[in-house]
Image (cartoon, helix red, strand yellow):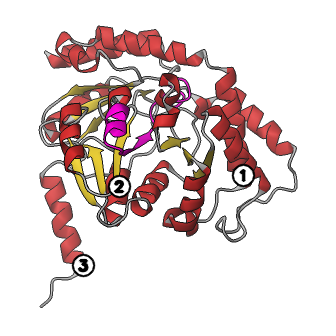
Amino acid sequence: MKRGANEMMLDKLKLRKAESTFRSLKTENNLYDFSSNDYLGFSRSAELRQAIDEALKKHPQASNGATGSRLLSGNSAFTEELEKEISGYHQAPNGLIFNSGYAANSAIFSCLPQKNDTILYDEFIHASVIDGARLSFATRHKFSHNDLKDLEKKLKRSTGACYVAVESIYSMDGDSADLIGIAALCAKYQAHLIVDEAHAFGVIGTGLVDSLGIQQQVLARIVTFGKALGLHGSIILGTELLRDYLINFARPFIYTTALPFSQLLALKTAYRHLLVHSGLQYILQYKSSLLRSNLPIQHQARCKNNKGAINCILISGNTEAIEFSRALQSKGFDVRPILSPTVPKGSERLRICIHIHNTDDEILELCHYIKQLSQ
């Protein structure tokens, strides 16, 4: 008798439970938020919500939905003007809005590299880049995290057009890519650099590429709106040529219903809100420094140079990381474990995200309990 789908699913889920890697959904809670990506508190901002509501009132005839993909009925002059406006904020020639950061990464890496080309990606790159690369016909190689020597070794062996994928701030460790060094290597070997700015945008200016002034050395940037901006969607920034190419060949763009007008207007309003409230970034940097300086000594070294809002402490083993997380949650702190296989086995950790709505007392109390549990 053939083994059916139900048996396969049961077996794989049993294995997940046995390895303490079983995932389940959780609803909202009343704990202090140290896990979300809402770094600037925009998703809960009453001021931003009011600004969005006021903006919507000026468009009473707007449709509730986009009604189709942008190549059919879902495009508008408002969308294209917004893409130009956002591109201007990032000193990019143009941009193309996608429904999520995942869609943007999977789109560009699945359609841009061709057969006999090479994709080199940092070993800690987001899963959406890996999934997109798998859909291309290009050769794929990972290089050791933030290791320029390993990257150069692989650049020397690359074939065809070479695309180098990095995150400006990495989502699991919170450390930054050496974009200056990586861009220099890409120029040396005529490779194309693509930077995911998901966790830098809004935390470090409008992104690390903008802060370093290396826009001309980057082929494409992926900026997502679901983190510091507190909304949803993303944009790929690049040249007019890149935009035209993606419109013609990026399947996650071609075959997806467009974002509705209400979301686009919210994005426009939130971008302007971000630029007016740039001082929030300094508050966030202070609070992040407060956390890092009060963590147990053995955990400070790993995140002492982090520029963003993400910090982590290694708790090797899925079971151990889960138990540590639950202990902190029992004290009122929403700190989540990051388990293998999301991270390599042996590098399980607690990922601690700082927000402007975390009070100094909350941060210090969290550090106190981490010290207690670490002993």
**Precedes in sequence: disc 2 or disc 3:** 3
Query: Is 263 located above or below residue 298 in the figure?
Result: below
Membership of 205 in magenta stretch: yes
Which residue corresponds to mark 2? 161
Task: Name the kind of residue labelled 3 in the image.
Answer: Ala
Which residue corresponds to mark 3? 5
Distance between mark 1 and mark 2 Cα atoms:
30 Å
Q: Residue at x 54, y 18 (%)?
A: 281
Question: Dot 3, crowdedness within 10 Å: few (<14), some or many (≥20)?
Answer: few
> Which residue is more in the foreground, 366 or 154?
154
Query: Is 36 located above or below residue 71 in the figure?
Result: above
Task: Name the kind of residue labelled 1 in the image.
Answer: Glu
Question: Dot 2, crowdedness within 10 Å: few (<14), some or many (≥20)?
Answer: some
Q: Residue at x 22, y 51 (%)?
A: 141
Which residue corresponds to mark 1? 80
Which residues, given as a range, are shown in magenta?
182-207
> Which residue is more in the foreground, 183 or 5?
183
Q: Secondary structure at mark 2?
A: loop
**Precedes in sequence: disc 3 or disc 1:** 3
> In the rendered view, does 220 fall on the left or right side of 13?
right
Q: Secondary structure at mark 3?
A: helix
Quarter of the view holding residue 335: top left
Residue 171: horizontal and vertical position, in percent? 36, 36
> In the rendered view, does 54 fall on the left or right side of 247?
right
What numbered label is drawn on residue 303? none
> Which residue is more in the foreground, 287 or 8?
287
Residue 178: horizontal and vertical position, in percent? 33, 27
